[in-house]
Image (cartoon, rainbow, N blue to C red):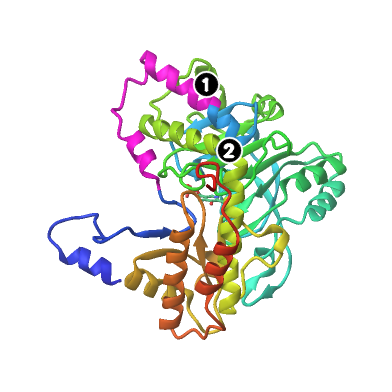
Amino acid sequence: MQKFAYYKDTTMLTLDFHPTGRHFLQIPGPSPVPDRILRAMSLPTIDHRGPEFGALGLEVLSRIQAIFKTTQPVVIYPSSGTGAWEAALANTLSPGDQVLMYETGHFASLWHRLAQRLGLNTEVLSLPGTEHGVPVSWRHGVQADLIEQRLRADTQHAIKAVCVVHNETSTGVTSDIAAVRRAINAASHPALLMVDTISGLASADYRHDEWGVDVTVSGSQKGLMLPPGISFNVASARAIETSRRAKLPKSFWAWDEILEMNRTGYWPSTPNTNLLYALHESCDMLLAQGLDVVFARHLRWAEGVRAAVRAWGLPIQCADPAVYSPVLTGVIMPDGVDADAVRRIIYERFDCSLGAGLGKVKGRLFRIGHLGDCNDLTLMAALSGCEMGLKLAGVKLAGSGVQAAMDHFSSHAAPSVLRKAA
Ligand SMILES: *Cc1c(COP(=O)(O)O)cnc(C)c1O
């Protein structure tokens, strides 16, 4: 890539790849970090055993519960989301335990591979077939009836956990978690419900307690608007009870010592202090605006972006309007067009990063992120970059997506508590 060559040619190492204006980081995570959060992070790192730290720890642990809509303990790890995936399984399961997973996309597949590598006995449900060169199962949410059927057949209760992804970041499809809980209950099955909402949390509605989730997994660098580097488990009382008997090896990831020390606002090992400042700030921003306002604006942005994709005449990756992601939109390319070549033009010419097609859909689609800290005009800029790049790549467009998105945003007022109309 040109930029990389430029980087190699220069003798001075520099991270300033984007010397004029702001780079448009429109990938579905990491998402742009607001200046307010960057400033909070720049405070001095303090003694993680001192009195101020305990106060910070307690505040952060309590605020983050409101974001997960839970009264149950939230475990914070200094890791990316993958660590919290492992922690969820390692804390609750034993070697050889049977786990039922559902293939909604690449992230569901990665969690599956991680479970296999931990020595779990995994089984994956999915929908058959392909459309536009894309697996059908990657265009729909979790089919709760398939889970119910499978659990009903498991009369011996060999299956110990059901694992699903709430917002599949590789496709732009969400899943109805309440329906999965109802399916497990309808089958009268004791399996734990584990949910990855790494990219859903704080941009898409999520309710740990109300939906009866046993272990929720999340991360910092998506809807929470933080840099990468912290991740979360939320554990139900039953998950914590189960963890006392779970035999998979764990030490760093073990909930027991962390929960014990969290009572006074501390952690067993050095926590990610500056990211906790950032988390404190992020929770303040989200809770002051109100989560419902946050969710509504992401739904509106998603609708505007889809209006653009429809106007271009390109298929939206998500085939079921009931489960469109408020966080990102996958755009499928016409046959013979390499989505990565289109992305490269948009990056090199217009300084805008878009998400690649991952795994089974590599080169078939790109993903436009509309999570975290966006506004109408950052999205208009990103869509302009997409439209120019698509044309430069020789993709025949049915019409102007930019015009369609402008029409959408100007005819639907944004929900806002900060600036009430005069
Ligand atoms: C980003 C993401 C992950 C991976 O998290 P890392 O922070 O990269 O380890 C897992 N699942 C989903 C749904 C994601 O969006």
Tell me the tag on residue 257. 1
Stretch of the chain drawn in magenta: 33-62
Q: Is residue 44 magenta-colored?
A: yes
Q: Amino acid at mark 1?
A: Glu
Tell me the tag on residue 183. none
Q: Is residue 319 left or right of residue 67?
A: right
**Going from the N terminus, do you reach mark 2 or mark 1 first?**
1
Nearest the eye: 185 or 282: 282
- Looking at the rendering, in which quadrant would you find the N terminus? bottom left
Magenta segment main secondary structure: helix
Q: In the rendered view, tell whether residue 317 sits above or below residue 275.
A: below
Q: Amino acid at mark 2?
A: Gly
State the residue at coordinates (81%, 43%).
Answer: 182
Nearest the eye: 9 or 327: 327
Q: Is residue 119 visible?
A: no
Q: Position of residue 130 (x, y in %)?
A: 68, 74
Q: Number of marks in the image?
A: 2
Q: Is residue 246 visible?
A: yes
Name the residue carrying label 2.
Answer: 290
